[in-house]
Image (cartoon, grey):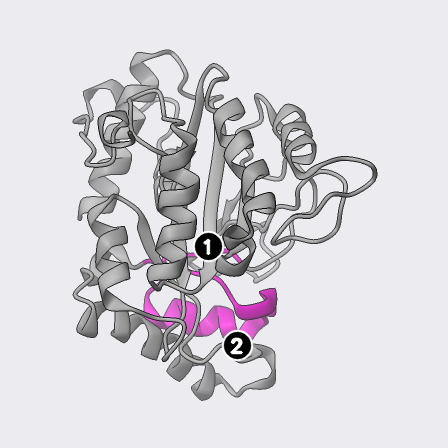
Amino acid sequence: MRGLAMAKGLLALMAMTGAYGTPNIILFSVDDHIVPEAWQAANNDTIVASQAVNPNGCLPPITWFTSRGPTRGNCTSAQQAFASGHELATHTATHPTLTELSYDEIVDEIAQQFDWLVDECGIPAEVVTGFRAPYFRTNSNVTQALVDLGFEYDSSVNEQSPTQPPAYCADGGCIQGEVPIWEVPTYRAFGSFKRSDPEPANGMSVLERLQADFQRKQGSGAPVAIMVHEPYLSDSSKRADIVAFLQWALAQPDTWALTYQEYIVWLQAGAGDDIASVLAYTCTCSSETAA
């Protein structure tokens, strides 16, 4: 399972640098479109253009919560993302408000998107483990559908505090109840209630808001979440602040940009685990290819 192997290797590198336990974490996700325009805006114009790298020399990865259809989904782009070490996760097939659907309709929406990634695009089924609900609208039927379909994590619900850790819901502490799935909250940037596509707020630029979020979370293990859509990143004035933040944040000590899947692997690694013995990984998106 390539994604988990990569994540375990990353944990080994964290341990060897003494960062295990309290690294600064960045989660960068793009919702909806996985098409050439989105790949250009998110990967080429943001990630590669930033020249920012993780401590192991790898470029920051993206988690793509994908939808499909004539304008939202393109298998070539999905395959590019997977080959570059990004994570392919699911949104839904047609982007409805799931809380307005029956359980069976919810299952169909999620399963159709999973099947598109796996059967049409050739993404290995075992690496498609994550989900985010359109409009962040979720309920117990959505959670049960994810459990029944075998998903590992959901990232749809609000955080209760800026440093709230994700939780494995079977152990309690989740809004969804005690079910066998991870809950990774949708963390807001500092200074606003809007969760995705951050804008200037309270006299602060987007860069300043993200920097303030980073600083208040240092040492907590809670991530700074950058959650955007392709049209947002295609606006060069908005994209500039995201690029600047990646450059600034990844220049800070013990700072890693992870996929959501990698982040969960890190959370699962207990303090007593021999992390340094886990095989390290190499990346195809290293600083050498960023020029």
Please, what is the three-letter code of the amino acid marked with disc 1? Val
- Range of the magenta residues? 129-155
Q: Are marks 2 and 1 in contact (CB under 8 Å)?
A: no
Determine whether the residue tagged by mark 1 lies in a helix, strand or loop.
Answer: strand
Please, what is the three-letter code of the amino acid marked with disc 2? Asn
Q: Which mark is residue 210?
A: none
Q: Position of residue 26 (x, y in %)?
A: 49, 35
Q: Is residue 50 above or below residue 96?
A: above
| Image side of residue 70 versus residue 177, left or right | left
> Badge 2 is on which residue?
141
Tell me which corner region of the image, top left, top right, bottom left or bottom right, holds residue 122: bottom left
Q: Position of residue 17 (x, y in %)?
A: 34, 12
> Badge 1 is on which residue?
30
Q: Position of residue 291 (x, y in %)?
A: 28, 29
Counting residues from the N terminus, which is met first, the one under dot 2 or under dot 1?
1
CA gap, disc 2 to disc 1? Answer: 24 Å
Q: Position of residue 129 (x, y in %)?
A: 33, 58
Q: Is residue 225 above or below residue 214?
A: below
- Identify which residue is drawn at 21% across, 33% down: 283
